[in-house]
Every structure is written in C-alpha cells, then in structure tokens.
Image: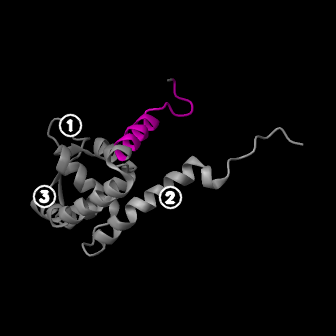
Amino acid sequence: MTDELPLRRTKRSLPIALLRARESVMGPIREMLASSGVNEQKWRVLRVLQERGPSELTQLADEACLLLPSLTRIAKAMEEDGLISRTTPEDDRRKTIAAITPSGEALIRAHSAKSAQIFARIERDFGAVRLEQLLDMLEALQALPREGEKG
C-alpha cells in the first residue's frame, strides 16, 4: 500500500472540467471566427483593446490571457494585417503600446451580432443567474494565491 492519495476521477477533475467547459463555450466562437481569418487569441486581443483602449503589451498579454512572447508574435501579425497599431512612447523606449485600428473595430462590429447570439444562447440555456454565479465563482478562483505565493 502506498501513501499516495488517490486522484479524482477525470470526470470530477477541476482542470479537465474547466477545459471541457471552455470547449463548450469556444467551439461556437471558433466557428464564428473561421470566416474572418482571425483566431481566438487575436479576437481576445482585439476585444481587450476595444474595451480598454491603447495598452502596453505586458498589460495586454495579461488581460488577453496570453504569454508575452506569444502576444509579441501575434501583435506583429495583427499589425501587418492592419488590425492593430504599435507605437513606442518617447519617454520609455522599452515599452510598446498597442491600439486597435478602424479595421480591427470593423472586424469586431462584423461579428458582434453573432457573438451576442452565442452568449444569449448560453445565458438562456444555462440560466442568467447561474451564469452570473459561475462568473463570480471563476473570478474568486482566479484570485486564489498560486502555489508558492503568499496569500
């Protein structure tokens, strides 16, 4: 007999349950974006920039749930596609500020009705109150200290 604790069954494993739930939500979003040539990472960048305005890349990476090296690569491609612009402030040449362009805004507008339909269906099927509770619980889960952090 070992001293190891038994693992939870995968059906009740939090990481796996979160991945399955993510796929339930993101599947329709990916379908929506398929015709635009924009993947979900680029969509998140556009949405954050639309909502927050011009942002420094480190902050943008955090808000869009991307690693900074990935965002740097994605931002280069998005700038080449005319979806965002990047500038370097004169007072701090180490920083890069990204901003959404009119083309990026147009892409969001082109998908806003379908996106709203997708989330209205989720809200209807899951329940508005339950959805708000879930979002509150997920925010609380995100706020937990990570392993090795003091909380």
Residue sitting farthest toward the right? 1
Q: Are marks 2 and 1 in contact (CB under 8 Å)?
A: no
| Crowd class of label 3 (few under 14; some 14 to 19; many from 20; radius 10 Å) | some
Q: Residue at x 61, y 50 (%)?
A: 12
Residue type marked 2: Arg
| Residue on which the image places disc 3 | 101
Q: N-terminal of the two: label 3 or label 1?
A: 1
Task: Indicate which label's residue lies in the foreground, 2 or 1.
Answer: 2
Could you tell me which secondary element the residue under label 2 belongs to? helix
The number of discs equals 3
Residue type marked 3: Thr
User: Along the horizontal axis of the image, is 110 left or right of 127?
Assistant: left
Measured in 3D between alpha carbons, the distance from the residue under mark 3 to the one under mark 2, in whole angstroms, is 34 Å
User: Which portion, as a residue range, is magenta?
Assistant: 131-150
Residue 107 seen in render: yes
In the rendered structure, does residue 76 fall within the stretch colored magenta? Answer: no
Res. 4 image quadrant: top right
Q: Nearer the viewer, residue 15 or 136?
A: 136
| Residue on which the image places disc 1 | 92
